[in-house]
Image (tube, rainbow, N blue to C red):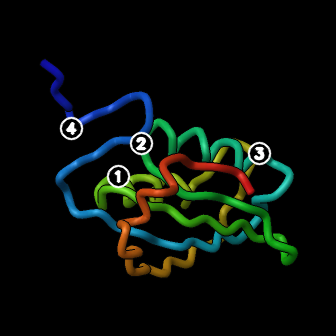
């Protein structure tokens, strides 16, 4: 007999019954050239979140994060401090609506 465990599947994505959320962040300060994207991806993956992070031409970093609201909020708190050599001066949050598919087609967190 074959059964599914939808609470946690290490091979692809965390599926939780909690409220799913999506947020876009703009992180300002000394956030480029200090491995900010690498550490953000590492932190997001440890929380089981999906989305992406990228550098912007104006020196900021942009991230889009999808997952259970409590874990998204934990990553936002981490982004306010950042990795050891970063100096975060501010984080702008824009909460977004999930796509009809719940944004589950993007099941990992990547650097763009």
**Residue at the spot of label 1:** 71
- Which label sits in the foreground, 1 or 2? 2
Residue 87: % across, % down: 71, 58
Q: Nearer the viewer, residue 18 or 42?
A: 18
Q: Is residue 74 left or right of residue 45?
A: left
Which corner quadrant of the image does residue 72 belong to? bottom left
Quarter of the image with the N terminus in it: top left
Q: Residues within 10 Å of mark 1 (few under 14, many from 20)?
A: some
Q: Which mark is residue 94?
A: none
Query: Residues under labels 1 and 2: Cα distance?
Result: 8 Å
The tag on residue 48 is 2
Sequence order check, earlier mark of 4 and 1: 4
Residue 76 placed where, x, y %? 47, 60
The residue where tag 3 is placed is 35
Kindly identify the residue that appears in the image at 37 percent across and 57 percent down.
67
Depth-wise, is mark 4 or mark 1 nearer the camera?
4
Q: Which residue is mark 4?
A: 7
Indicate left or right for 61 with 41 as reference.
right
In this rendering, the answer to whether 71 lies above or below 28 is above
Q: Earlier in the sequence, mark 2 or mark 3?
A: 3
Give the number of the mark in front: 3 or 1.
Answer: 1
Q: Nearer the viewer, residue 77 or 71?
A: 71
| Residue 33 rendering spot, x and y as whole percentages | 86, 51
């Amino acid at each position: 007999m074959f059964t599914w465990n939808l609470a946690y599947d290490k091979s692809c994505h965390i599926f939780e019954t909690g409220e799913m959320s999506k947020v876009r962040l703009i992180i300002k300060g000394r956030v480029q050239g200090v491995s900010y994207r690498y550490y953000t991806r590492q932190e997001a993956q440890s929380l089981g979140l999906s989305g992406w992070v990228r550098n912007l031409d104006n020196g900021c970093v942009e991230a889009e994060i999808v997952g259970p609201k409590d874990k998204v909020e934990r990553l936002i708190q981490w982004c306010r401090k950042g990795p050891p050599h970063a100096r975060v001066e501010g984080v702008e949050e824009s909460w977004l609506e999930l796509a009809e598919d719940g944004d589950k087609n993007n099941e990992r967190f990547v650097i763009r």
